[in-house]
Amino acid sequence: MPTVIEPKLIAGNSNKPLANAISRRMSLYRGMSVGLVDARVERFNDQEIFVEVYENVRGEDMFIIQSTSRPANDNLMELLIMADALRRSSASRITAVIPYFGYARQDRRTKARTPITAKLVANMIHEAGIERVLTMDLHATQIQGFFDIPVDNLYASPVFALDILKHFEGGLEDVMIVSPDVGGVARARELAKRINAPLSIVDKRREKPGEVAEMTVIGDVTGKKCIIVDDICDTAGTLCKAAEVLMEHGATEVHAYITHGVLSGPAVERVKNSVMKSLVITDSIAATEDVAAAPNIRIVPTAPMFAQAILNIWNGTSVSSLFETDTLGPIYEGIL
C-alpha cells in the first residue's frame, strides 16, 4: 500500500470529454499529472458489459466519473460494474462522480402502482460498494436522503451567476430571472439573489402528462431580458413555449440557463427555431453533434468545479465552500 494515498480517476463511456477535462484540471491544481486509470469498458456481442482495470488500485482512493444519461440503463450498469471491479480489487474507497443522476425525476409516487426508481437506483449504487456520491443539481434535493452513504450535491447556479455577470455586464438592471414552473421557484430565487435580480414565474397547467394546455406569467416582464432557469431540459417543448409566452408579455429577449441538457428527440431543432436568443447548458451530459453545432446553444464547463470538489473530498476539506460564487470566481477566471 502506498504511504500517501493519491486520488485516482476512472471513467466509463458516458462522458469521456468531461472525465478528461476533470483530469486536466486536477493536474493543474495539484501541479502533477492526474490521469485516468487505464481500463476498458466494453460489451460482448449480446451487449453484456465487461470491465477490466489494467492498473493496481489496491488501497487507492478511487473516483468513478460516469453520468447516467442516455442510454441511462447502459451507463448505470457500467457504473455498477466498475464499482464492483474496484471493490474486488481492494480499492480503499470508491466515490461515484455522477454529474447527471438519471432516474431522479422518479423521486415519488405520483399515481398508484408506480415505482420510486430514484430510491431503487440509490440502493443499487450502495450495494455495488460505492461509499460516497458526488453529483450536481439533483432534480429533487430530497433524493440525498434515499442514500445510506454521504451525498455531495453541487449546484450550477454559482457558475451560472458568474456567466450571467459576464455576458450581461452593463445591463443587469434589465435582467429578470424566470422560473418555468412553480416547483422550480426555489432554484430560480437562489440564482436571482446571487445576481440581485427580480424574479418572475411562468405557471403552467397540464391537461395530461407531456402536454401544456395553458401558461400564465406571474410578474411584469415588460422591457426585461428574461432568463429562464431550470435543472433539466428534455424535449424543450415547455421551455420554448414559455419563451414565446414571455415575449408575448413584453420581454425584449429570452435566454435559458439549464443545468442538464438532456435534449432528446426534437429538442435541438425546437431550440434552434425558437424565440430564445440563447440556451446555456453545462457539460454534465456529453454534447451530441447537433447540440455542438446549434448556433444558439452554449455549453459552460463543470470540470473546474468537479475537480476541486474531488480534491476537497480526498483531503477532507469542505465541499460546501463550492456553493459560493466568490469561491468559484478564481477557479473559473479566464474560462467563462
Image (cartoon, rainbow, N blue to C red):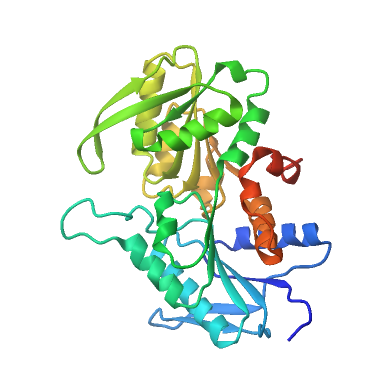
Q: Quadrant of the N terminus?
A: bottom right
Whether residue 302 can be seen here: yes
Q: Describe residue 68's horizontal placement relative to residue 163 as left or right.
A: left
In the rendered view, would you say 279 is above or below 26? above
Quadrant in which residue 26 is drawn: bottom right
Q: Residue at x 55, y 23 (%)?
A: 197
> Where does the image place residue 252, in percent across and percent down from the top left?
49, 16
For the question of whether residue 301 can be seen, the reply is no
Pick the front one: 75 or 101: 101
Q: Residue at x 60, y 76 (%)?
A: 93
Where residue 296 sits: x, y (%)?
Answer: 53, 35
Give whichever of 148, 181 is nearer the camera.
Answer: 148
Task: Find residue 322 and report its horizontal and vertical position in percent.
Answer: 64, 48
Indicate whether 147 appears above or below 265: below
Q: Nearer the viewer, residue 15 or 203?
A: 203
- Residue for point 24% across, 54% down: 109
Image position, residue 191 (x, y; %): 54, 33
Q: Is residue 79 left or right of residue 143?
A: right
Relative to 283, residue 9 above or below: below
Q: Is residue 38 left or right of residue 84?
A: right
Quadrant including the C terminus: top right
Q: Quadrant of residue 316?
A: bottom right
**In the current view of this chain or complex, which residue is farthest to the left?**
112
Residue located 59% across and 37% down the image? 160
Q: Residue furthest right?
A: 31
Total marks placed: 0
